[in-house]
């Protein structure tokens, strides 16, 4: 079969592609790696580009449409086309920065804003060792109007609110189990705006690695806040310097999702394959797949996973808040030495 797949030579004289529409992406990839991701790093810009894919795509609501109200266009670039409107929606706090950083890159290429947002997220994730190769499509139609407010989940929402919102946006595809799959993204993540006194607070001890520490560390008993307490959407974390979202905490302990959450711990292939699957679908919400071209071949295969699943120093199975009733929590070695603090993810310099 391989012999039947005819590749086209790209006008750049260097690359070939299965579809000519993918050729333009080689230059976009190079621009992203050199001028946004510091030569190919899994830093804050990569994390924020991945978060942006979600906040653009999830803003679509068939439930609103059924009431005759415009429900948003999903992965249509609206968040970056109407930033003065959508970045003022509360859950989109902080995304104005990555939109501003991406803006000159979008302008340099012949690509829709909708395609650019999802492609930047896929390339950003590919810089994180252990990540899956995420889907890249071109041909999305750009938004002509902003999404309505109220469609992006908040960390203080209940599991029911979050499950209902994801089910609506996905026309029933994203159930509570697939919601857990989506949250794998929080393995390469930090919060800048949940605690107004601190920025770059990671969700796990390895925000530069696409590993399963996020699923293990969210199951540990929370003991303190990394900064100020009493912030909406934040609960106590087990480690100095680490932040825990209330939504991650409650979904990790909800009887519908606790065993699925635990099943990701030390299951690197699952953390890759399940996110690869849900990102593929999320990244084309509101678009017609038949009018898109699959250019996933342009996304680099990420580096192999690094490290091994472990309890951070000073913590062990005794600190696990067991939530899955069916299966005991697996045993792992504890890092040597005294309890240490997790370092913040440095903020990107402004555009
Ligand atoms: Fe996420 C981050 C929430 C889902 C991705 N998050 C984040 C934060 C929050 C959230 C709050 C922080 C922000 C600041 O800065 O402060 N999420 C959330 C919720 C949900 C989610 C509630 C539902 C459940 N995510 C998600 C998904 C995804 C994501 C699905 C994918 C796509 N996030 C993300 C990331 C991050 C975040 C990547 C990081 C960013 C940075 O680092 O900057
Ligand atoms: Ca991690």
Image (cartoon, grey):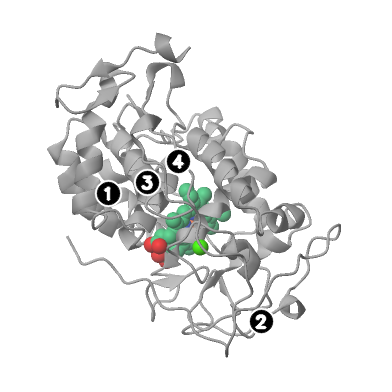
* The residue carrying mark 4 has its beta carbon less than 8 Å from ligand 1: no
- Which structural element holds mark 1? helix
Q: Is residue 287 left or right of residue 62?
A: left
Which mark is first along the chain, 3 or 2?
A: 3
User: Badge 1 is on which residue?
Assistant: 83
User: Badge 3 is on which residue?
Assistant: 121
Which mark is first along the chain, 3 or 1?
A: 1
User: Badge 2 is on which residue?
Assistant: 315
**Callout 4 touching callout 1 (CB < 8 Å):** no
**Callout 1 touching callout 3 (CB < 8 Å):** no
**Callout 3 touching callout 4 (CB < 8 Å):** no
The image shows residue 51 at horizontal and vertical percentages of 41, 52
Label placed on residue 298 = none
**Callout 2 touching callout 3 (CB < 8 Å):** no
- In the picture, which quadrant includes the C terminus? bottom left
Q: Residues within 10 Å of mark 2 (few under 14, many from 20)?
A: many
Which mark is first along the chain, 2 or 1?
A: 1
Q: Is residue 73 left or right of residue 232?
A: left
Which mark is first along the chain, 1 or 4?
A: 1
3D distance between C-alphas at marks 1 and 2:
43 Å
Which mark is first along the chain, 4 or 3?
A: 3
The image shows residue 131 at horizontal and vertical percentages of 48, 50
Which mark is first along the chain, 4 or 2?
A: 4
User: Badge 4 is on which residue?
Assistant: 133
* The residue carrying mark 3 has its beta carbon less than 8 Å from ligand 1: yes
């Amino acid at each position: 079969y391989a012999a039947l797949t005819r590749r086209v030579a790209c006008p750049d004289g260097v690359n070939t592609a299965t579809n000519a529409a993918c050729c333009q992406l080689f230059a976009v990839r190079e621009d992203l790696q050199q001028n946004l991701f510091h030569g190919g790093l899994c830093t804050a810009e990569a994390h924020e580009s991945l978060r942006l894919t979600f906040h653009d795509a999830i803003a679509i609501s068939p439930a609103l449409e059924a009431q005759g109200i415009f429900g948003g266009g999903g992965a249509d670039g609206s968040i970056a086309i109407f930033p003065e409107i959508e970045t003022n929606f509360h859950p989109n706090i902080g995304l104005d920065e990555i939109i501003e950083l991406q803006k000159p890159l979008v302008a340099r290429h012949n690509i829709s804003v909708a395609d650019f947002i999802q492609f930047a997220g896929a390339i950003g994730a590919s810089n994180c060792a252990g990540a899956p190769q995420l889907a890249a499509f071109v041909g999305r139609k750009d938004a002509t109007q902003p999404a309505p407010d109220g469609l992006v989940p908040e960390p203080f929402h209940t599991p029911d609110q979050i499950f209902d919102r994801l089910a609506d946006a996905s026309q029933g595809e994203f159930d509570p189990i697939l919601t857990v799959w989506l949250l794998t993204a929080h393995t390469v993540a930090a919060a800048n705006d949940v605690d107004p006194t601190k920025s770059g607070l990671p969700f796990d001890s390895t925000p530069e690695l696409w590993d399963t520490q996020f699923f293990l560390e969210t199951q540990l008993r929370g003991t303190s806040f990394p900064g100020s307490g009493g912030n909406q959407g934040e609960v106590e974390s087990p480690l100095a310097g680490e932040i825990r979202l209330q939504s991650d905490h409650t979904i990790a302990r909800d009887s519908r999702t606790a065993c699925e959450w635990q099943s990701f711990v030390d299951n690197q292939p699952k953390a890759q394959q399940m996110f690869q699957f849900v990102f593929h679908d999320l990244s084309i919400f509101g678009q017609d797949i038949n009018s898109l071209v699959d250019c996933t071949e342009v996304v680099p295969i990420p580096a192999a996973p690094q490290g091994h699943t472990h309890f951070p120093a000073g913590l062990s199975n005794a600190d696990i808040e067991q939530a899955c009733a069916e299966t005991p929590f697996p045993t792992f070695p504890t890092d040597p030495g005294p309890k240490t603090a997790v370092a913040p993810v440095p903020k990107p310099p402004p555009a």
